């Protein structure tokens, strides 16, 4: 079973986290199931950028991003070549190391 390692994030996961996850689960769902409260303002429907993450290891094991996901990533803060929307990226058979950006562009959340 693959493992997701979340690097420390000052607010969401100060100590970092590591947990096993079933293949086919999105990074966002897996994080939420393990009490890493990653923001997901559009309720995981690929309609915002709040769940943007950097996949620091294991990126090539993920399916390619859809055109819609790529369009939204163009609007995200701090995008780099290993950026994905965690609500769309499904875990395959490899371990993943995930970095949650310090900032997000939150277009729809009422929490801010």
Image (spheres, rainbow, N blue to C red):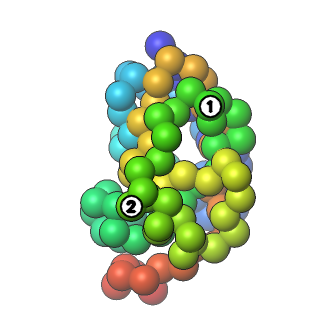
Q: Nearer the viewer, residue 13 or 2?
A: 2
72 and 17: which is toward the camera: 72
How many numbered dots are placed on residues in this image? 2
Q: Nearer the viewer, residue 45 or 111?
A: 45
Question: In this figure, which residue is indicated by the disc labeled 2?
Answer: 68
Q: Which residue lies most toward the front here?
A: 67
Kindly check if marks 2 and 1 are in contact, taking CB atoms under 8 A apart as contact.
no
Mark 2 and mark 1 lie on one chain; the one further toward the N terminus is 1
Q: CA distance from mark 2 to mark 1?
A: 19 Å
The residue at 71%/41% (across/down) is: 56
Name the residue that disc number 1 marks: 60
20, above or below 30, in the image: above
In the image, residue 39 above or below residue 75: above
In the image, 8 versus 92, the foreground residue is 92
For disc 1, the neighbor class at 10 Å (few under 14, some 14 to 19, many from 20) is: few
* Residue 90 against residue 7 in the figure, above or below: above
Q: Which mark is residue 35?
A: none
Counting from the top left corner in percent of width and height, residue 74 is at 56, 70
């Amino acid at each position: 079973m693959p493992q997701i390692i979340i690097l420390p994030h000052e607010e969401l996961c100060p100590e970092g986290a590591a947990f096993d996850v079933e293949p086919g689960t999105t990074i966002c769902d897996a994080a939420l199931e393990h009490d890493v409260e990653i923001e997901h303002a559009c309720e995981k429907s690929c309609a915002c950028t709040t769940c943007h993450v950097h996949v620091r290891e294991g990126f090539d094991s993920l399916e390619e991003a859809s055109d819609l996901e790529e369009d939204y990533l163009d609007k995200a803060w701090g995008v780099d070549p290993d950026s994905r929307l965690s609500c769309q990226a499904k875990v395959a058979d490899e371990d993943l190391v995930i970095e949650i950006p310090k900032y997000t562009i939150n277009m729809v959340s009422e929490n801010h």
